[in-house]
Structure formats: structure tokens, C-alpha cells
Amino acid sequence: MALVNENYLKLPGSYLFSEIARRVSQFKEENPQADIIRMGIGDVTRPLVPAVIEAMHKAVDEMGRPETFRGYGPEQGYEFLAQKIIENDFLPRGVKLDVDEVFISDGAKTDTANFQELFGLDNIVAVTDPVYPVYVDSNVMAGRTGAFNAKGQFDKLVYLPCTEENGLKPELPNTKVDLIYLCYPNNPTGMTLTKDELQKWVDYARENRAIILFDAAYEAFITEDNVPHSIFELEGAKEVAVEFRSFSKNAAFTGTRCAYTVVPKELVVYDSQGQSHSVNRLWLRRQTTKFNGVSYPVQVAAAAVYSEQGKKQIKESIDYYMANAKIIREGLQEAGFKVYGGVNSPYIWMQTPDKMPSWDFFDKLMKKAHVVGTPGAGFGVSGEGYFRLTAFNTKENTVEAIERIKAKFRS
Ligand SMILES: *Cc1c(COP(=O)(O)O)cnc(C)c1O
């Protein structure tokens, strides 16, 4: 008799986006004329840039000629891409890395979900609340949590609330934790930490021999100077952190798939005898066993992100989204809403009027303004009373949506 991994049974149904889709389609059925603007999108809307497409075309042609055909590549990615990553994303910020500290993969979602495999089941895991659900669910599946409780949280997991009181910045845990997931710029809140604020986490991890799993998928959207682009800009971070990056949001690779994870050679994890083990070696072992690399044309396409043309074209896309973010942020402020994010991130996290439950506000916004967003409660208990809007849309739609919100909700 085949037995199920009972950890999977602890997971409540993935309710957020299916429930949104259900409510939108019901509303459309009842109001076929309504021109709905979707501001809940967590996916880019602008296409791959010409420099990337051109490089990918060439690489596809190479695959069709015997003298340039490539079969299996290195599981951890081609050196030509790892070199470009180091030279462009890290060296200019004073971070030196070796090529074998960069692991190219098919997604930061995959890597943030898989990385927990290297760690024992007794580790105490801390996540921010609200949170990108992948960190939580992957640890539930592995058996690192208890049951889903009446509060709507998993037992044994340590939640770090991000609330109005702490300015949506998590405080250091007051109980000992071993693994800490941090995502900055943050999805869903759009908030960032300054260098000093992030340094406190690095120091905590060093003192407690904890490991920080740092998700920097939105790094390219940072506009302010005192916001670190990489956790490795901070003193001692290589001893305690892994960093996840992705070409998804900066370069529109959400459907093309390419990302990378930096695992410094200084980073160690301990066995029950107190012996240290290289996390880099363990991740290499894991990837060479369970992963066969990203396709050659996609890695060539990702390398083109760092070409002169590629950089210029990608910057245009990011500027386009960030102009939308500014329209949303300032428009909502004018309408009297309290808003966070949207300065170093394509996400705007708004307080609902009078702390209205976020699903009620979802309905109200859809019915009155024909604008769809994402209820904060879908990202965690502390997301209740908040609502996420994204800049991934056309400028025209963004302007129109904000005009409607102002007209219907101005306080
Ligand atoms: C979009 C996103 C990613 C990127 O995932 P990919 O698998 O690389 O597309 C990672 N983390 C967060 C928080 C995200 O929102």
C-alpha cells in the first residue's frame, strides 16, 4: 500500500489566486460591460527585449549545426553566464565571487523551494508575515512545521510580523531560530531594508549560527542609495547567507526561465556532532543529482541581459514599470490611502480604508472601480487590512485605474 507524505495533507488548498479568478469571472458574468483593469498581476507584462531575442535566435541556430550543437551542459550552469553575473551584478558593488559560487537554475521559485532540503528537520524556520508563500509551503512539505492552526498559521514556524507599528520591517526573533527567509525588495509589501537594518540580521545569524535565505528577485527595481542590492555587500554575510536572484522580473524571463543562486564557500552548516560542512558542496551535490541545467539558448539569452544593448533596453522596461509604481503610489496617497512600497519595488502595499477586511475591499474595489488587486490576507495573517497593487501593466491602464480609485474612494 502506497502511503502519502502526510506533510502535504497539512497544506490548505491554494486558495488565493483561484478565489480571485472565481470572483472576477462571476462579476464579469453579471456585468459583461465592465472594463476590468487587473492590478493584481505578479507577472511582467512587457516582452523580452530585442538584445535577448537576438542572442537566443543565434543560440538556437547553433543547436542545429553539428559543429556547434550542445548536449548536456554543466548542471550548475555555463561559466560564460556565471562570469557575466559576477562582473555585472557583484563586482561593481565590491562583492568578489568565484564562478563556482554561482549556481544557474530555472527559477528562484524552484531554488527557494528546494534549498531547505540541505537542512535537518529540527531547524526552526522564521519567515516574515506577510510572506511569499513558497518559503512556507516548501518547509511544510518537508515536515519542518506542525499543523495549520486556527490562527491560520503553521505550528512550529516562527512568524515575524510586519505591521504598521514596526513600519513593515520585521524585528529580530525573540526565540532562537536557525533558518531565516528574507525577501528584499519585498513581495508583497514593496518594502526594503537599509544596509544598517540588514546588517542586524547578518549579525544575528553570525551570533546564532543561523542561515539567512535571502531572496533578491526584485533587486533591479531598487532606486534608493542606502538599500543594499546584495546581502553580500554587508560585513560577514558570506558566512551566513545564500542569495537568490532571477531574470524573471528584471528581464521578463518569467516564461523563459532563468535564475541563479549564490552560495559562498565560507557558508557552513553543522551536524549533530558540531562538525561543519560546506553548504556550497552540499548544494552542488544536490543540483548535480537532481537537476540537469538550464537550456543553452536560455543561458545565452540571459548573458545578453548584460550586453550594452541589453542593459539599456532592460532599464527602459524597469523605468516604465517604476513610472507606473509612482503613479499608483502618489495617486493613492492623494486619495487619502496609507501606502507602502512602490519606490524600490513594482509592488504597492496599501492599507484598506478603516482597516476593512482585505477580501471585502477586493469586492468593493472590483464593484465600484472595476479594478482587481490582491487581498493582503492571502500573504499571511498580518496582511489582513492591506491590499497589493502591482505596476506590471500599461501606463494607460495604470492611470485609468488610479483615476477610478480616486473618483470612487477619495476621503
Ligand atoms: C517572482 C518571484 C520570484 C521569481 O521566481 P522565478 O521562479 O525565478 O520566476 C522569486 N521570489 C519572489 C518573492 C518572487 O515574487
Image (tube, rainbow, N blue to C red):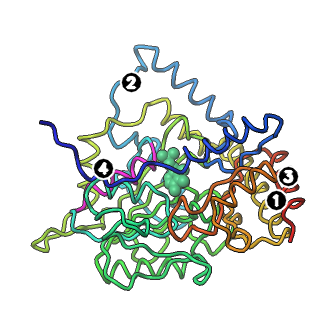
Q: Which residue is mark 2?
A: 70
Please state which of the two labelled residues, at mark 4 or mark 1, is closer to the viewer: 4
Pinpoint residue 260: horizontal percent, then vertical percent.
Answer: 44, 49
- In the rendered view of the protein, which quadrant contains the N terminus? top left
* Stretch of the chain drawn in magenta: 107-120
Of the numbered discs 1 and 3, the one sitting upstream in the chain is 1
Amino acid type, label 3: Val
Q: For the residue carrying disc 2, how many other residues have a C-alpha within 10 Å: few (<14), some (14-19), or many (20+)? A: some
Residue lying at 44% horizontally and 30% vertically, measured from the top left: 296
Give the image quarter of residue 267: bottom left
Q: CA distance from mark 2 to mark 4?
A: 38 Å
Give the main secondary structure of the magenta stretch.
helix
Give the image quarter of residue 222: bottom right
In the shown orientation, is residue 281 left or right of residue 36? left
In the shown orientation, is residue 82 left or right of residue 56? left
- In the rendered view of the protein, which quadrant contains the C terminus? bottom right
Q: For the residue carrying disc 3, how many other residues have a C-alpha within 10 Å: few (<14), some (14-19), or many (20+)? A: some
Q: CA distance from mark 2 to mark 1?
A: 46 Å
Q: Which mark is residue 327?
A: 1
Residue lying at 65% horizontally and 47% vertically, measured from the top left: 41
Q: CA distance from mark 3 to mark 2?
A: 47 Å
Amino acid type, label 2: Arg
Of the numbered discs 4 and 1, the one sitting upstream in the chain is 4
Give the image quarter of residue 277: bottom left
Depth check, front residue: 296 or 274 = 274
Q: Which mark is residue 399?
A: 3
Pinpoint residue 219: horizontal percent, then vertical percent.
Answer: 58, 59
Please state which of the two labelled residues, at mark 4 or mark 3, is closer to the viewer: 4
Q: Which mark is residue 8?
A: 4
